[in-house]
Image (cartoon, rainbow, N blue to C red):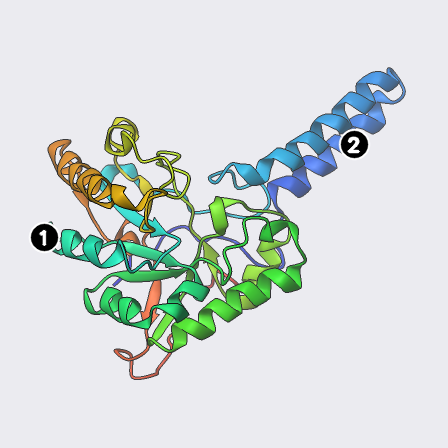
Amino acid sequence: MYPKLKRIPLNRHFVSLAERAGLLSLSGAGVLLFYDVNLSVLLLAGFIILCMIAPFFPGFSFYLPIISRGTPDKKAVALTFDDGPDPLTTLCLLDLLRKHRVKATFFVAGQKAAEYPEIMRAIVRHGHTIGNHSYTHDNLVMFRSRKTIVREIETAQNVLNDFGVLALAFRPPVGITGPKLGPALMKTDRYIVNFSCRAFDGGNRWIRGLSRKILKRIGSGDIVLLHDVRPHKPFEVDYWLNEMELILSGIRNKGLAVRPLDEIIGRPVMVNRDRNDGKMEKWNDGMME
């Protein structure tokens, strides 16, 4: 069903770019030490700065492999919605997506999913896929312990179990990664999906010109980041819905199709346990040996 892609080597033998860069930096600093101490210190400082800023680049596979876009030859994009569900906006969005015959992926926060079970059932009933977006949506969770990250993923999944959903794809809050995320994903048997196109809307705090920003950046193979939480000012819900309408129409006018995320990235985003009669197949083609 899913085309076989190049394996993402997220396993105990995987050597990250951070590890390789660290080894090269230490080796280079050792050599430079005999010539110029200042250059040696500068090289090591550069590596430390790189380690500090890398987590804030959602598509930068520095600490672990990250899926942030699909193949550009499909003339299609995937829409993803983070941080919901929200009773003021998600149901309206579902109606709009149905009108345009579009399937999206909802990266839900477990805490909200538990609070609004009927909306979660509606998302599944409409045929959309669901990803794990942590339980509390702590923006700084990637800087906490590995145990905390694992707990956030597993607690969110425990909520999703009630809806017959096993979410295979994980998206960290705000797309921030870190050195502890890879081991946490190995422990929980997940892989990371971030994004390649966004409008920097601040979780629907800044929605003015949202469609214009997205349509200016979007291209084949993009994974688009949007949010299905209420705007910062609740009276702007109608404006936000109109922006969603403009995005859906604009994508079509640019000659692009909106396809499910699993088709764009070539691997399943979730398993519907109800439809699989409880039989869990090996989904990762050896991704986490």
The location of residue 226, given as percent across then percent down, is 33, 44
Q: Amino acid at mark 1?
A: Lys
State the SS at label 1. helix
The residue carrying pointer 2 sits among few (fewer than 14), some (14 to 19) or many (20 or more) residues within 10 Å by Cα, namely some
Residue lying at 87% horizontally and 16% vertically, measured from the top left: 35
Eyeballing the image, is 135 above or below 174?
below
Residue lying at 84% horizontally and 17% vertically, measured from the top left: 38
Give the residue pinned by disc 2: 27
Residue lying at 30% horizontally and 67% vertically, measured from the top left: 120
Q: Nearer the viewer, mark 2 or mark 1?
A: 1
Q: Is residue 235 left or right of residue 65?
A: left
Label 2 to label 1: alpha-carbon separation: 58 Å
Q: Is residue 51 left or right of residue 28?
A: left
The reply to whether residue 116 is visible in this rendering is yes
Name the foreground residue: 183 vs 283: 183
Name the foreground residue: 85 vs 77: 85
State the SS at label 2. helix
Give the residue pinned by disc 1: 99
Asked which quadrant contains residue 131, the reply is: bottom left
Residue lying at 82% horizontally and 24% vertically, measured from the top left: 41
The location of residue 139, given as percent across then percent down, is 54, 49
Tell me the quarter of the image containing the N terminus: bottom left
Q: Residue furthest right?
A: 34
